[in-house]
Image (tube, grey):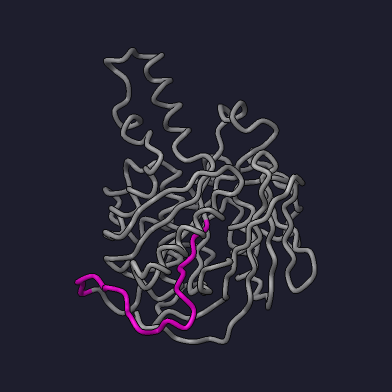
Amino acid sequence: MSGYPAVVVTGCGLVHPLGDAHSLTARSLPAHWSTSQASAEALHAAVSGLSDLFPRQSLRRLPVYVRLALLAAARALQDGGLWPCPTDLPLVIGSASVCQKTSFDFMDSILAFGPGLASPLAFSHAVNNMAAGLLSLMLHTTGACTTITNSLLSFAGALETATVLLTAHRAPAVLVGAVDEWDARFAGIFPGRELVPAAAFFCLRLADDQSTPCTRPDTDKAETQPDAGAGAEHTLKAGSHELYSLELAWEDSQREEAVCLADGAPLAICTAGPLDSLFQPLACAACCAEDVHEAHIRQSAPEYGMAATIRLHRRPDREYPC
């Protein structure tokens, strides 16, 4: 990213109806996947690990959209050795769908029951920053909390915002991620496209900045953390470890493309279609899982005439203070 210091990925977390990050590549499944396969049962199973991390009562009224993001965020924090969550950790989410499903639910409840009996829960969830706000409450962090909505480039915009926060030294680490969901009522908003109901989160730090630890919560929790869900292996580290250096580049583009090159070879990612808003974060998670040495992940948004390229490069394992 021109003008910004390099950042490193120190933790990665994924929640997807198909399973873990290894399942997202065409080595395991066909390259194109329909959101119709993401049944309510599959989504419920995908987020079942939340009850091991948070009290069931606190999860009762969270929509699936937020549950996906919360579990992916918790897995990223565990993978980065930042669990329990630092109290000053900034949170940035990129999402194309944001709160549209709950907004539709609220409007439908007005049509069905009248303004006096409209759903207050749907109303409270019909806010653009709803997922990020609820995550900050559940994770007990008071750092910066924002949501970026920019169609297919929402995650790229979130990465740029996270880098700005790191460069400004707002905190030694930032939690950045992407989450989307799909509803048949979105067809008029995203014509010819489908959004995959999934979430991917990453812990970021400035490269070679080992000076400042995160502010740890006052807790007497044991050194071992609960399992982050079936199909994932996460251990508590003594400190955050570098996984990949990450660079983001923007350029003008009128082409429709979503390409992932892993070690110079195309890596087909199972998405909801050729232009999926979660293509880049899912590809990043898959590259981390496949332990590739170098990756170039390019996503375009022809309606904006822009394209974003994420470059990942494997770095030596180095420990950061937590």
In this picture, residue 77 sits left or right of residue 222:
right
**In which quadrant will I find the N terminus?**
bottom right
Q: Residue at x 39, y 82 (%)?
A: 239
Is residue 218 in the magenta section? Answer: yes
Q: Is residue 176 magenta?
A: no
Residue 270 in sight here: yes
Q: Identify the main secondary structure in magenta.
A: loop
Q: Position of residue 86 (x, y in %)?
A: 30, 69
Residue range in magenta is: 200-220
> x, y percentage for residue 140?
26, 59
Q: Quadrant of residue 109?
A: top left
Q: Quadrant of residue 268?
A: bottom right
On the image, the x and y values in percent for residue 4 come to: 51, 69
Residue 229 lies, with reference to residue 317, above or below; the image says above
Please name whichever residue, 75 or 215, is drawn nearer the observer in this view of the structure.
215
Residue 169 x, y percent position in the rendering: 36, 70
Number of numbered markers: 0
Residue positioned 57% across, 40% down in the render:
39
Which sits in the foreground, 207 or 1?
A: 1
Q: Is residue 81 above or below residue 96?
A: below
Does residue 46 appear left or right of residue 278 in this picture?
Answer: left
Residue at 69% in and 70% down: 295
